[in-house]
Amino acid sequence: MNQEQISPFLQPLVEQLIHIPGVVAVSLGGSRARGEARPDSDWDIGLYYRRHIQSSDLRALGFPGHVVEPGTWGRLVNGGGWLLIDGQHVDVLYRDLTVVEYWIKEAEGGRFEVDNMAGHIVGLPTYVQMGELAIGKCFLETFHAPHSLMPSESKPRLGGKEMRPSRYSLLRDMLLVAKW
């Protein structure tokens, strides 16, 4: 997603988020990334970072809401904030890129775990990271993602095997239930 495709509402926020120390990419997820948003849908913003991120940097942007420390929500979505910006609900979700890379490699080998997480009745499977990258829209990045993290034009792979379209659709549907 390039600068011209960013909603005018989000443009100033995205430009501020990418300058937070440690942040390497800012992405759009959830119903808005899937093109299924309603007028009252919130905005799900993934904040991918390396090494560490300070919640004080997100608070310093000055938006009203609730911001938590990294690690508060678990290891997959490990923190973030629920913000109110110009009357719009914006969820900023921290993503440790080292953790994302690890779980993508595990999923490609057919391995996963399920984390207990508030808002997810049956837990959040670690392979959700693959779906987020496949469905999400990257606004800005300051790094070149390893090839294994970039969606490819070839058939998706899981457990070292190419997935038939029906299997991929099922995986995508399962990930949508997780509601990034």
Image (cartoon, helix red, strand yellow):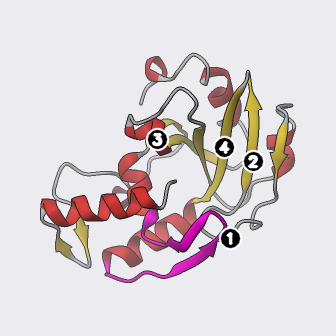
Mark 2: secondary structure: strand
Mark 4 burial class by Cα count in 10 Å: few <14, some 14-19, many 20+: many
**Residue 118 is one of the magenta-drawn residues:** yes
- At x 51% / y 45%, what residue is drawn? 143
**Which disc is residue 31 wearing?**
3
CB within 8 Å, label 2 to label 4: yes
Q: Which of marks 1 and 2 is nearer the N terminus?
A: 1
> Which range is magenta?
109-128
Q: Is residue 57 above or below residue 35?
A: below
Q: Is residue 99 above or below residue 20?
A: below
Residue at the far left in the pictured view: 164
| Location of mark 4 (residue) | 91
Q: Earlier in the sequence, mark 3 or mark 4?
A: 3
Horizontal side, residue 111 vs residue 141: left or right: left
Instruction: Give the Cα distance between marks 2 and 3.
Output: 18 Å
Horizontal and vertical percent for residue 101?
47, 66
Instruction: Give the Cα distance between marks 1 and 4.
Output: 16 Å
Mark 1: secondary structure: loop
- At x 69% / y 50%, what residue is drawn? 22
Q: Is residue 84 above or below residue 118?
A: above
> Which part of the image, by quadrant, shows the N terminus?
top left
| Location of mark 2 (residue) | 81
